[in-house]
Image (spheres, rainbow, N blue to C red):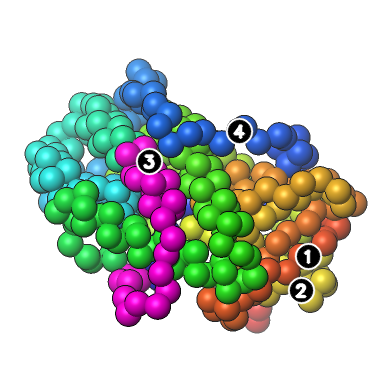
Amino acid sequence: MRNFQIPKFLAWLPVMLALSLTAAFAKPAEPAGADAAFPTLAPTDRQAALDKTIAELLSQHHYRQSKLDDRLSALVLTNYLDDLDFGRAYFLASDIAGFAKYRNTLDDALKKGDLQPAYDLFNVYLRRLAERTARIQTLLQQDFRFDVNESLDVNRKNAPWAKSSAELDDFWRKRLKHEMLTLLLSGKDRAAARELLIKRYDNRLRQAQQTTSGEVFQLYMNAVAQAFDPHTAYFSPRNTENFNIQMRLSLEGIGCVLRMDEEMVTVVELVAGGPADLSQQIKAGDRIVAVAQGDSDPWLDVVGWRLDDVVERIRGQRGTVVRLKVLPGKAGATAAEKTVRLVRDTIKLEKQAAKSEI
């Protein structure tokens, strides 16, 4: 089911919910229109210098002692394209053919601190995302028929890249039809389901528009690091803070480990004794589709949002209330949403603590 996943640069690491009151209560920006323009992102001088340093450290001191050569360059490109378009839902085969010029040259660029190829690729992705969002909004205006025999490939990791926009249109028509059917089965009428999907894809475009140069750098450096070893990663300042939270073994939140799966924030596990665990209303595999603050604030549909932005809206001080709309994981396509009210608390991460035994 990975083909419904949003780009990995918007959903890379499981994140432990923790304290961030200001972000949790921040008012979200208004959704952007599908025709909104993207700024052209470019590397900074500092990132170029850091790129060169990271490349030298990995090539000289990584335990695998891999060389920065054409073989590694090809692996970096593959990792990067997978991160951008894992479900092969945005790039065309012609785009991939155009990217072939980088397959044996990224190693040379890394040695020189040249990040421009990474940003060129990312800017193409942003253009394809804007174009596809406009087509999605057009496709959502039609009335989907559920009395015809059709199938949808739900594992597109190794699917061939679409040769034309028409081929992608057909894939997206079926995908949107699937999403519409899922919402109808959860109890929404067609009008409400269509409105929610329109808003959902507008939100996704808006989130992509907010991508910073630093986030592109993180994505690319992570693709480089994982080319050396799947367990080697580059941590941005935000991810470093999340890592430090886990190292402190104490936080204030609801006690969930989350990840992005098929464009939905999914519960990986619960911290024993935390609010989510004690409520007995949230289980591993459940999907969070909306978040609200306190007992009266309006709901925010968070499907398609960036994981870190969703986490910031769930975080909060001990004693404050957060409400979640949850789709039970085991119920499948027929799942009905349920509302869960949780009071944030201090959580000890004893499970993550180092242990010794004789």
Q: Is residue 106 left or right of residue 63?
A: left
For the stretch drawn in magenta, the main secondary structure is loop
- The mark total stands at 4
Residue 19: % across, % down: 75, 45
Q: CA–CA distance between discs 2 and 4?
A: 31 Å
Q: CA–CA distance between discs 1 and 2?
A: 7 Å
Q: Specify the farthest residue to the top.
A: 45
Q: CA–CA distance between discs 1 and 3?
A: 34 Å
Instruction: Give the amino acid type for the residue marked by disc 3 in the picture.
Output: Ala
Q: Residue at x 68, y 69 (%)?
A: 337
Q: Nearer the viewer, residue 197 or 228?
A: 197
Disc 1 + disc 2, Cβ < 8 Å? yes
Disc 1 + disc 3, Cβ < 8 Å? no
Q: Around disc 3, counting alpha carbons within 10 Å, would you say few (fewer than 14), some (14 to 19), or many (20 or more)?
A: some
Q: Which mark is residue 134?
A: 3
Tell us which disc is closer to us: 4 or 3: 3
Q: Quadrant of residue 24?
A: top right
State which region is magenta: 130-155
- Position above or below: 55 against 136: above
Residue 27: % across, % down: 71, 34
Tell us which disc is closer to us: 4 or 1: 4
Q: Is residue 211 visible?
A: no
Residue bearing the label numbered 4: 30
Tell us which disc is closer to us: 2 or 3: 3
Q: Which mark is residue 350?
A: none
